[in-house]
Amino acid sequence: MPRTLGQVEEMISAKLACGVRATIIGSPVGGGAMVPLPGVDNYAQSEDDLARHDAWLAGLVDRYPERLRAYVYVNPFGGAAHLHRVAQTVRQPQFVGLIANTSVAGRYLDAPEAEDFFALAAEVDLPVLLHPPAKPAAGAGLENLLLIEQLGRFGDVTIGLACCVLGGWLDRFPGLKLIGPTAGGALGLLVEKLDRIMRPTHWDGAPAPPQGPSPQQDRPAAGTARSAMGPPRLMRRLAALAAPPSSYLPRIWVDTATPSANAVDLALRIFGPDRVLFGTDSPPLPHSESGATLDLLDRLGVTGAVRDGIGEGNALALFGDRLPPAPRDAVASGR
């Protein structure tokens, strides 16, 4: 684990020095490992282990109630007992939402088996931060940890958010509150491509035809003409979307946890200025990232109501009164 994950007081002090008064903490791997390790399966953690991890987070919030709130880690495919415990835990006042992986053991959340998870998120009516896992599906084949961190996980955010849209979950559960880190990955660059999934021009504007055989199915005889783009079940779900996929993007929140000013600028235009949250991914990144993110907003010339929204207003609208109240001195000074 990065050393900064244990520096709670240092983190709070460094952020206060930059003007950041509160942080939502949480782990995208529960109590597991943040990097791929031989023999370590983050999805094999016991409920007792995960409960101890949540109790540790709650203890930190109790220790610093004006500075911290937390997410509860959830495995979207963890089963009924797991989801029940998560539902009970997230109702505790120390927690403000859920944190789940964009892919789980190579599987994305458009899978029908994720329905119980999305139903839970809708029931508790709290935000879900969709964070890439230690072993992102989009990083399959990458061995270098830095490539996994900077490329694989970024790609997993992109595909993971898209799969939530294409899976129809925002139609089925209109109140879902999904947050994508790193300014939503590259999703903002794929607006037109998302819509082409519904109406691919190279298929004469018709929905893409069904998938060819899987390795477990009989293959067609040699020379047999067959079109292949997606499994029939997925195509039926795509056809059932109430609107073009791109139209769902303004219903997703993203954060500023990226070193790219271009990515944040694009997020403001695609997702909307009321859907961008101040985020730094610090820790595990160095505590100086808070100041770096503020500098990034300066370089973009983000001021006035838009900057106030990114800094706090959008988070207050999303999380409501579950966030730490502003200290009296901050209220008195207008901060």
Image (tube, grey):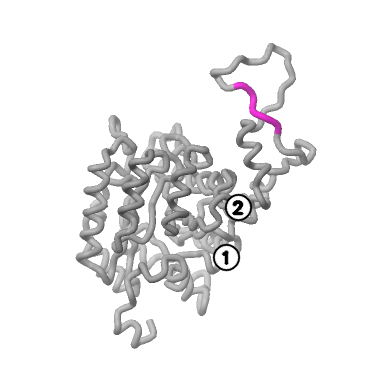
Which amino acid does the dot numbered 2 rest on? Leu
Closer to the camera in the image, 203 or 301 = 203
Q: Is residue 143 visible?
A: yes
Left or right of residue 266, residue 91 in this image: left
Left or right of residue 6, residue 171 in this image: right
Residue 254 is situated, as x and y percent measured from the top left of the image, at: 49, 59
Q: Residue furthest bottom?
A: 332
Residue at the spot of label 2: 189
Left or right of residue 128, residue 73 in this image: left
Q: Earlier in the sequence, mark 2 or mark 1?
A: 2
Residue at the spot of label 1: 272
From what the image shows, is residue 306 above or below residue 92?
A: below
Residue 16 is situated, as x and y percent measured from the top left of the image, at: 29, 72
Label 2 to label 1, Cα distance in Å? 14 Å
The quarter holding residue 92 reads bottom left
Q: Is residue 197 visible?
A: no
Q: Is residue 324 magenta?
A: no
Write the start and end of the magenta stretch as one range. 209-213
Q: Are marks 2 and 1 in contact (CB under 8 Å)?
A: no
Residue at 39% in and 34% down: 143
Q: Residue furthest right?
A: 204
Quadrant position of the C terminus in the picture: bottom left
Q: Which mark is residue 71?
A: none
Which amino acid does the dot numbered 1 rest on? Gly
